[in-house]
Each structure stands twice: as structure tokens, then as C-alpha cells.
Image (cartoon, rainbow, N blue to C red):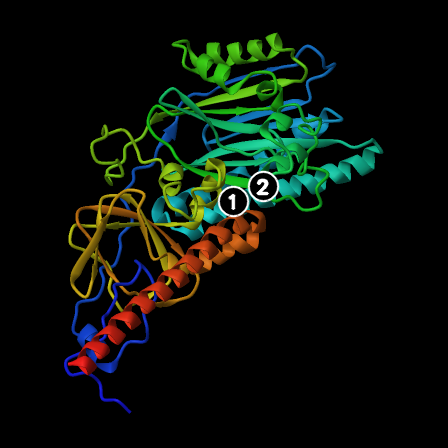
Amino acid sequence: MAPSPAGLKRPQPAPRIGEPAASPSAADAVTRSERPPATRPTRPNITPSRFGAAATVSDIGLRMRENEDAAMGLPNVPLYAIADGSGALWPAGLTLRVLADEAAHLSEFQAKVAAEQDSSSRLAVGHFFESVFNTAGRLVKEEMSVRGEGRATSAAVALTLMGPFAYVAHVGDARAYLFRDKKLRCLTTDHTLAMLQLKRGEISVEDYASSPFKKTLTQAIGVTPEIRPDIAEVRIANGDLILLCSDGLHRMVSDKRIAEILAEPDSLDARATKLVAAANEGGGKDNITVHLVPVESLSIEDAVAEPGTAKNERVDVARVLGKCFLFEKISESERLLIAPYFEYQAYEAADIVCREGDPGDSLYVVVQGRLRVTFQRAHLIDIGTGGWAGEISLVREGPRTATLTARDKVVLLSLTRSRFLEIMRRRPALGSQLALPLLEFVGQRVIDLRNRFSRINALMIGRLDDESSG
């Protein structure tokens, strides 16, 4: 057996950020035990926001005999909702009546979210709406049986406020939009066969525009055996305007035209009236109902504004997540669905987020500030807004291979492995879209490691050859 070349040490390659390390030696463990532990994160200090006075308009349209839409506004809760009935007048009203009967329970969730802002409290809001919509669905089916009528259903969209978060729950093709900085963004994805075909890649965007299945609902109150509503979590900002509407608006009026009307300097009531008028001008084929709900004031002191932006401009969580490889290929509305699964964590400058060798089970995404990444005290890289670390922890738990330190005040979104698996379990279609880039990433890491070991092996063979020839 050939002796090892004198003084030859195996190179120690720096790991990919967040990559689990090999099992530590006893000496390493002793060294780490003498180091101060990672800093315990705090939650950002966020002052609750509020809605201003809303404007509501509902119209029968030009082609319908009756108005099967219904609207509800409970500003003291606050809770706003629109139900878009089909087949009869009563399904929409029954749906909103169930929602109104349960609205008092929202105060319990508001207190928890305001106090904790953790994922458990925020996800509970979605469970509330899921329970309410399923109750409404059961009652609509029972009422249909009693009346002996044909199929009667309802789509619905609801909006509430919890601390700094607006929550939008929807089923069917009623929609919610966010109008911010004169730009309109849809917060919901229609539960229609045409949209399902589009997302699966079965039809093109052009085919979708003229699809006969745009009104064929894949989920509706009173028909679907089990309703799984989409729950979007939105960090709202001062000056935001939220639009809820039935499909009688968005099928007749383009998003571009809606944005133009909302940008006009008229009162909310006038703009709501203009939206309905535009739908009728576009054909008025269905009932039209709109809520316009303004965000009147918002005071956030946890510095969640990106460096260099105005004080009242807040970080857009959906777009921050879109910078991370794991979420860049899913839609903005889908990022809002997974937002409640993240924890908000705040650190001061020089705080240790995690230490090399510590157990790791979380992906971190930087919302604000900068993280310094070090390996064996060597500076590797700094991570800014939209940067991430710890992605391999979503695949398997293991010791951290790098230390993350806050360079300045930092706000992070943290997704634990258990929450990631919960997304996969509760929303398998969305989970599959996240699993593919993660598998591709792991596969690339295997290739990188193989190439790295090949270079190390070649280096060692070259040195052995040099010593033999010497």
C-alpha cells in the first residue's frame, strides 16, 4: 500500500449555500459547542392596517331577466363578499348569509394574527373560509333537494383584513384584483375548465380567449362535493385599492380598461358605476357586481421597504418570491396561495441567522436587508432582496454547511420542510410545480459534486505522479 504523500491535504470545497454537510467530527462538535448559538429571530413590528369606506354597485346587465348576484359589506368586521349565483336567485343569497352568520368568529383569528403573525395563525384564516364555503355548499344542495329545482350553484369571493394582511378567499370565477401604483393585478385564478386546460398546457392563450369552457366551473358552491377554496394572502400598502367582482365585469371589460377606470380621479362610487357601465357597453351578457375597497392607512415600522424606495412603498412578497428559483415559474396568484406557509423573521445587524453545523430544516428568502454567507470563516457571498439560502433543507434535514449573518436589519421569509410538505399534500397540483425545479436543482448539485470530485481526484493523481517522478 503506497504511503500518503507528505503534507498533502485533501481540498475542502466550499458547499452550495444551504447544502447539508457530512456528519461532523467530535473535534468539530466541541469547537461549535464553544461558539455562541444562532440568534433567536423576532417578528417584524407591523402596525395593523384598515380599510376605508367601500363602494358597491350591482346591475342586472342587458341580457339577464333577474340579478342572481349578491353583495355583502360588513365594514366593522371587516368582511366584503360577492356571490355569483347561477340557476336561481337564492344560492348567492344563501352563500352570503352563511358567511355573515360566521363572520363574528373572524375576530378570534384577527387577534391571533395581529399578535403572532406566525404561519399557524395565518393558515387558520384559510381553514375558516374553507369550512364556511363547504357549509354553504351543503346547505345549497339541501335547499335544491327541498325545492326540487334543477341545478343551482354559486361562485363567491370574500375579502377580510388581519393586521397587515388582506385575505382573499374565492371559489369559481368571481375575482379579486389589486390596484397599486396605477397597475392592476389579478389576485385569483378562475376555477374553470378553460383555465385548467390552459395551466396544463392543453390549450394556448389564444385558444383560452375564445374557449367555450370559460364558464364551465371546476369548483362551485352547491355542486362540488368538497370545496377547496383558494386563499390568497396579500401584504397591503397605503393607497392600495382592492376590487371584487362577478364574472359579469371581467368577461366584458379588459383588465387594461378596468385599470384605466380605476386610475381616474373620480370618487370610488363614480368609478364603481363606470365599471358597471363599461360592462354593459361591452355587451352586458351577465349580471355585474363590484366592490371597491380602499386601504386608507397603513403604518409599518419594521422597515420592510426595499433600500432606496419611498418610506410608504412596501416589499411585494409575491414578486420577492418570484426571484427565487423554486417559485419563479408559478404565477403571482399561486405565490399568494403559498405565502401563509412562510414565517416572517426579523434580525438586527450582526445577528446570526444560522451557524455552520447547526441542524437545518428551512429555506430562507430575503425580503429586506442583506445576509453574509461564510464557510469556515471565509466570506462566500452576500445575499440581498430576493436571494435565498437553505434550499436543500427542503429535501432532507441535515447540518448547515454555511453561516448566515445579518449585515444590517434583515427581514426573512422562512419555509420549513414540514410546511413545504404540507403544500405538496394539500395542493398537489401546485406542489408538483414546486417539486420539479427542486428535483432539477438537486440533480444539478449531483452533477456539480461529481465534477468537483473529479477535479480533486485529478489534482491528487497529478501530485502523486509528480512525487513519483521526483
**Distance between the Cα atoms at labels 1 and 2?**
8 Å
Image quarter in which the C terminus is found: bottom left
Task: Looking at the picture, tell me which residue is in the foreground, 23 or 179.
Answer: 23
Which amino acid lies under the numbered mark 1 shown in the image of this protein?
Gly
- Residue bearing mark 1: 126
Q: Residue furthest right?
A: 148
Q: Residue furthest front?
A: 469
Which residue is painted at 37% across and 58% down in the image?
362
Q: Is residue 58 left or right of residue 388?
A: right
Which residue is painted at 40% across and 61% down in the image?
447
Tell me which label, 1 or 2, sits earlier in the chain.
1
Residue 308 in which image quadrant: top left
Q: Are marks 1 and 2 in contact (CB under 8 Å)?
A: yes
Which amino acid lies under the numbered mark 2 shown in the image of this protein?
Pro
Which residue is painted at 66% across and 23% down in the image?
210
In this view, the mark in front (1 or 2): 2
Secondary structure found at label 2: loop
Q: Residue furthest bottom?
A: 1
Image coordinates of residue 218 in percent, x first then y, are 68, 38
Image quarter in which the N terminus is found: bottom left
Please tell me whether residue 284 is drawn above or below residue 243 in the rendered image. above
User: Could you tell me if residue 323 is visible in this image?
Assistant: yes
Image coordinates of residue 466 in percent, x first then y, are 19, 77
- Residue bearing mark 2: 229
Which residue is painted at 38% across and 19% down in the image?
182
Image coordinates of residue 78 in percent, x first then y, are 46, 32
